[in-house]
Image: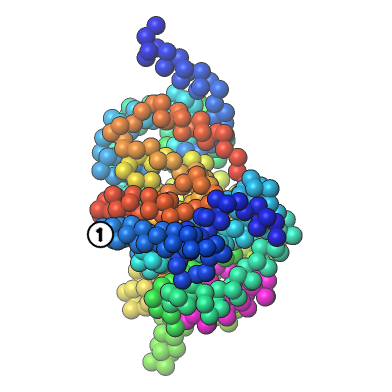
Amino acid sequence: MDFRDGAHNLYHIIVASLHIGKLRYLAVVIESEEAHQTSKVIKLLQWLDSVGVKNVCLYDMNGVLKKSKDTIFQIMKNAKSIEEVNEDVTHHAPDHMTLEFVSYVDGKEAVAKAANLIFVENFKRHDIGGELDHQILLESHLNQALQIVGCKGPEPDLLLVYGPVRSHLGFPPWRIRYTEIVHMGSLNFMRYGSLIKAIYNFTKVRHNYGT
Amino acid sequence: MKFSSHTGLSQTLQVSLLNTPMQKSSGGITSHLLGGLCCYLRRCIFSVLSVGPLPNHITFIMDGNRRFAKKRNLGEGDGHKAGFSALLSILRYCYELGIKYVSVYAFSIDNFRRKPKEVQSVMDLMREKIEELLQQESIINEYGIRIHFIGNMQLLTEPVRVAAEKAMRVTANNQERVLLICIAYTSTDEIVHAVQESCKDKWNQIQASKEGKVSNGGSKINGLDLHFRDSCRDNATEACSSLHKGVKDAGEKDALLEQNSEKHSDNYSEGEITSCNGIVEITEERKYKQGETASIKLVDIEKHMYMAVAPDPDILIRTSGEDRLSNFLLWQTSACPLYAPKVLWPEIGLRHLVWVVLNFQRHHFYLEKKKKQF
């Protein structure tokens, strides 16, 4: 048995012991210049599928991954788009992957669209005028408006960054309040072992959420 | 005081190394000279760093005070006091290096959920330290620092809010450095506030132009309202109405709104979402054609962010090795490198700052490129 067999066996042991259920939604941020390597992106998705991570959001700033969507779905035959999936993606049965494709315009610009929706609905329609100061816009209302303008995906538990720097590169700010952000290095040098390690470390973390 | 009784020789030395020669040290000539030497070395290091690009704004998530207190068997309040001392040191290093803006995450809205006794003691400490900062010989006057308190100030207890407002007033004319203290802050609260303010602004704009048009004979706004009301009868905007309902009766009906929203979002298909978008777009187009004020833009929202008083941070440092942002500056950190050294906040030192700035310099070209693309 050579070294590589040993390493694979070790990975299988680690993967089998992962409390993968803790990772309900994973986001992958890829530097746009590296995102053109669709074959690498597909390989990464296949690794994630094999480990049991079924709900993945793929993000790159310029929308390069959105353009490769068709190619990815052709090869990942058991994957579905988040738009096709009606139920709450974090609760569906793990027989297929759910993929979401996001870019910079789905972040801050979406908040601007939601603001317009809220404005048109609440302010203009009912001629509120003097009551403005007593209106309280809550986070739940903005959340709802964002859902309506198309931001369906939930908050990821873990965000992996493939690029030169640990930065979320404009991932929709609304969705990363308590997301663990891990830097994986360049996509060109991606390694299965590093991926397993990042997921394993995530499953060990305990959250206080500020309390 | 518990903290000082645990101070060993190494810590005394460390404290005097960090002080500038002007501050009196309790030891003799040796520690005074040593302090002076360290200060000189620090200035040399900073001169070398200054050859490369320097960040304009560094932001800190000061995490680890409670863990520090536990590690050293101190009272919880002492952990926060040690954290405050660390803050003063770091501010000094940053401002000496020439960094103009420093922001810190002092207290999150989530932190209000801690035990009331702890929250009260942190509030008391903050008030005490704000007053200390405003004294004549403090670092504020030494570096000409303007202080901004960033967050939902209405959530603070009155003494703290009064102290904070005083600090902002007193330092309003300082122009050389800026310190932003994020208190009762979360990013999501900031974004909601900015959206609400931009809606109010837009309303005021429309009212003003309405008055102008009425005096010129005939308002075109009612026409728009009718159009929108008619198109709002289909399924897609049922959730829009429940959205409206929710905003109007904010407090009590929140639970009902949650129920409604779940029901409606289940009925959504992409087509309905698009048609709702389409309605917004048609309305906007009509407004534009009729010469009305345009829709709310991203810049309108951004100018109402609490953090609009400073440029976006160039570096974010979170101590204690935690990998998340915990609802801090999510909007402003699109092109910001995030560092998470494992050191606890009260133990942060010059070497961590130097290491982070070197890393920033290494990736500066890439980050500038990213900023231009946004």
* Viewer-side residue, B205 vs B373: B373
Q: Report the magenta stretch's main SS.
A: helix
Which color scheme is applied? rainbow
Q: For the residue labelled by badge 1, is the local secondary structure a helix, a strand or a loop? A: loop
Is residue B160 found inside the magenta-colored segment of the image?
Answer: yes
Magenta-tinted stretch: B149-172
Is residue A52 found inside the magenta-colored segment of the image?
Answer: no
Res. A184 visible in picture: yes
Residue positioned 49% across, 74% down in the render: B140
- Host chain of mark 1: B
Q: Mark 1: which amino acid?
A: Val
Give the residue at mark 1.
B51
Quarter in which the C terminus of chain B is drawn: bottom left
Quarter in which the N terminus of chain B is drawn: bottom right
Res. B241 visible in picture: no
Residue positioned 68% across, 68% down in the render: B124
Residue positioned 49% across, 53% down in the render: B348
